[in-house]
Amino acid sequence: MLAANKPTPENHLLAAMSRPAYQRMLSGLESVELSYGQVLYEPAGLIKYVYFPVNCLVSLLTAVDKLRTLEVGMVGNEGMVGMPMVLGVGVSAVRALVQGSGTALRMTAARFRAEFKRNVPLQRALFRYTHLLMAQVSQTAACNRFHDAQSRLARWLLMTGDRLHSDQFRLTHEFLAHMLGVRRVGVTKAASDLERRKLIDYTRGNIKIPDRRRLEAAACVCYRIVKDLQDCAQV
């Protein structure tokens, strides 16, 4: 289904563009439904489409070894999946994995290249987002090195909730272990500690955040650093 009849884009990058600039892109945008666990790109894989999430969430994962992966970034409706294309690179360095099901607007890589060259508002929006994503990736790297599993889990849950615009979502311990790069037993302990402090409710893979303010107090400073950068960029 094409997005030509969509009156207002819900992706922040597209919404920030002028109406004429957005209208020029409509014929190349296609609305697609992304499913939890769906892989959009593999490392060293060709980027065939770029995606502008609307109400879904995509994790960017790097391989630690043959068995483990680690999340280095996440993209919701504030950004675009396929950012190497902005730098003229058509190959992904990470695995792009759908973490939250929902809708995205996608464009073929060939069409994006042509559109990016002539669409100055799109260039400006994506250059600004490149800075934000790089800041998120670098802060995540520091977080993974220096902070304990419980504070990292709290940060990760808050960032997920921000991008899904919900304080309730479905996640398994196995999935969280891949995101945080720790053993499943470590995730279980961290989640149990947060639940014991009544910072989260966790039942059969369903996580609910009853009080975001208290959970943020338990999170490492990385959450606030990244969020403040993003909020300032949207002003």
Image: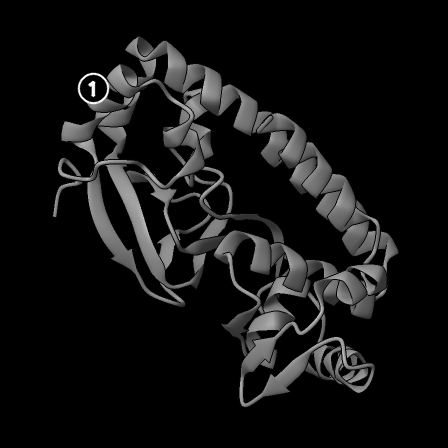
How many labels were placed on the picture? Answer: 1
**Residue to which mark 1 is pinned:** 24
Q: Which residue is drawn at 59% across and 77% down?
A: 207
Instruction: Using the rendered view, name the quadrant where residue 70 is placed.
Output: bottom right
Left or right: 170 as drawn, with respect to 194: left
Instruction: Using the rendered view, name the quadrant where residue 144 is placed.
Output: bottom right
Q: In which quarter of the image is the C terminus?
A: top right
Image: 109 above or below 81: above
State whether residue 141 appears in this view: no
Q: Which residue is at the front of the view, 208 or 101?
A: 208
Q: Which residue is at the front of the view, 63 or 126?
A: 126
Left or right: 151 as drawn, with respect to 235: right
Left or right: 129 as drawn, with respect to 107: right
Q: Which residue is drawn at 46% across and 53% down?
A: 58
Point out residue 105 in the picture as x, y percentages from the top left corner.
28, 42
Q: Residue at x 42, y 25 (%)?
A: 16
Image: 98 above or below 136: below
Left or right: 131 as drawn, with respect to 198: left
